[in-house]
Amino acid sequence: MLILKLIALLIGAFVLFLIMDRFNRFSRDEIGYEYFTHEHTIAMVIGYALILVGRVWSIGSTNDPLNGIIVMLIGIAIIAMVIKNNFNKTPRLYAIAGSLMQIVIYIPVTFLIIPIAIMLFGFLSQIKPVYTINARD
């Protein structure tokens, strides 16, 4: 059953990529603007991650939930800046459609990237042995 879940996850990620690629090609051909770029992906994933962390922080904090709310507001501000950029550079109808696509599609992308980033940080931060040359045994 685990293999079927992994296959379904891979197929879902591939379909998500195809949707993003097709919409990017359409918007590039029509208006000369791409909605799904590396910069937008990084900004939206960081924004959504901050919203998730802030929510957990505000719910789990018994002393001061304001800290979590501030973190969530920072995430919302990052996402709002990406959407504002869309509206500044494209016609209104395309900006609405592209922003809605970004808001909806980047949620599962965030849930795919966060575990990968955690595993990558864990792998890259492995403790290495320290050898002392002048130590007395």
Image: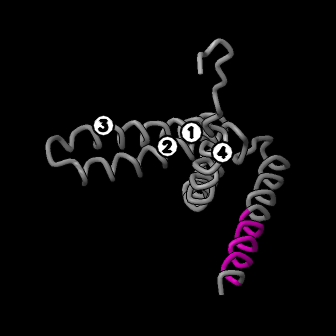
Nearer the observer, 30 or 45 = 45
Left or right: 17 as drawn, with respect to 42 = right
Q: Position of residue 115 (x, y in %)?
A: 58, 55
| Camera-nearest label, 4 or 3 | 4
Q: Position of residue 10 (x, y in %)?
A: 74, 70
Discs 3, 2 touching: Cβ within 8 Å: no
Q: Which quarter of the picture shows residue 89?
A: top right
Mark 2 or mark 1: which comes first in sequence? 2
| Camera-nearest label, 2 or 4 | 4
Discs 4, 3 touching: Cβ within 8 Å: no
Q: Position of residue 133 (x, y in %)?
A: 68, 15
Residue 130 on the magenta span: no
Marking on residue 114? none
Residue beneath disc 3: 70
Nearer the observer, 27 or 72 = 72
The alpha-carbon separation of the residues under discs 4 and 3 comes to 30 Å
The alpha-carbon separation of the residues under discs 1 and 3 comes to 19 Å
Q: Which quarter of the picture shows residue 125?
A: top right
Q: Which residues are magenta?
A: 4-16
